Amino acid sequence: MKDVMKRALLFDGSAMISVWNMPKAAQEGARLHGMSDDAAEVFGKVLSVTAYMAAGMKDTRDKLTVIVEGDGKLGRVVTCGECGARVRGYVSNPKERLSPGQTQAAMLGEGVISVIKDLGLEQPYRGYGKIVKGDVAGDFAGYFMLSEQAPTALALACTFENGVCKVCGGAAATALPGCKEEYLVVLEDIMRNFTDMGAALAGGGPEQLIQEHFGHFSPAYLPDVTPEYRCTCSRARSAGMIRAIGKKEALSILAENGEIDVHCEFCGKNYSFNAQDIDKLFNEE
Ligand SMILES: [Zn+2]
């Protein structure tokens, strides 16, 4: 099964239903960071909601960053998304596991969700939410409501078994500008069917789920989105970062370490620059 996100407009375009499943992307992220299944299941949910948000961005240069900063076992969760639902991310403590009797809430703890969207405007958009429930879906629904004024019924699921992702995705019914209150009530009602999102995604593809639950509203499908785990790091970008710290600082690190290593937290890659590389880098300017 290929990673896919289906989105459709409902009620003359005043609401949208999205259903997606992206186990390959989630598994790639978990693999790159050597995550425990417990860590990967929470990370996958955050990655999945990031893909949903990124799918809504219009320009290929648009990007967003989600930082979930809680006092739980995972530490900080950082994810990035780009137009077309290309995502990447990491967590502070990828090997952590739940102790017997603990629920997923112990992974995130309590804290703050920050979302930074760079939409090519002068100032990036910044929105905040809280993690209080620790179930990711409930906390992000709170964020959408309070920070984006977009009432959204959200269900998420991510399950891993021995490093293999079974499902990672969700369903989101969101009110667009002009959505009548009565439509919202109907959507929320239908979304209550997704109490076990994991079972729903395991049992049917996104389009099948939309047809099954929303088919009687004649959904108008938008083009498919293919979520994908992809890092944007490169040697050229790393060189840019070294240029940004300045020649003096770069030479001092070089003198101390013999080379400069730029480590990418999103995919674990290392880019090494020796004295010759550094010399070339600053003389190219
Ligand atoms: Zn990378």
Image: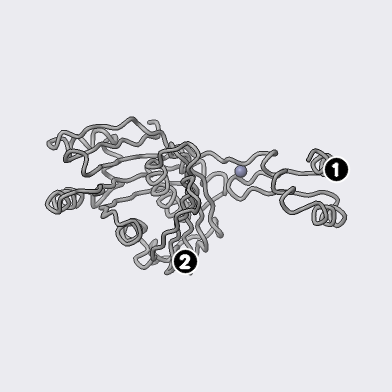
Task: State the quadrant of the N terminus.
Answer: top left
Q: Which residue is drawn at the image coordinates 52% and 49% (left, top)?
A: 89
Residue 156 horizontal/vertical position (percent): 33, 50
Residue 162 horizontal/vertical position (percent): 47, 46
User: Residue under circle 2?
Assistant: 70
Q: Determine whether the residue tagged by mark 2 lies in a helix, strand or loop.
A: strand
Q: Determine whether the residue tagged by mark 1 lies in a helix, strand or loop.
A: helix
Nearest to the observer: residue 97 or residue 4: 4
Say what amino acid the circle numbered 1 marks: Asp
How many residues crowd mark 2 within 10 Å: few (<14), some (14–19), many (20+)?
A: many
Indicate which disc, 1 or 2, sits on the residue closer to the N terminus. 2
Residue 163 horizontal/vertical position (percent): 49, 45
Residue 10 horizontal/vertical position (percent): 19, 39
Nearest to the observer: residue 269 or residue 59: 59
Q: Is residue 52 above or below residue 8?
A: below
Task: State the quadrant of the C terminus.
Answer: top right
Judged by depth in the image, the label closer to the viewer, 1 or 2, is 1
Quadrant for ligand 1 reads: top right
Say what amino acid the circle numbered 2 marks: Gly
The answer for how far apart the CA atoms under marks 1 and 2 are is 42 Å
Q: Left or right: 231 with respect to 38?
A: right
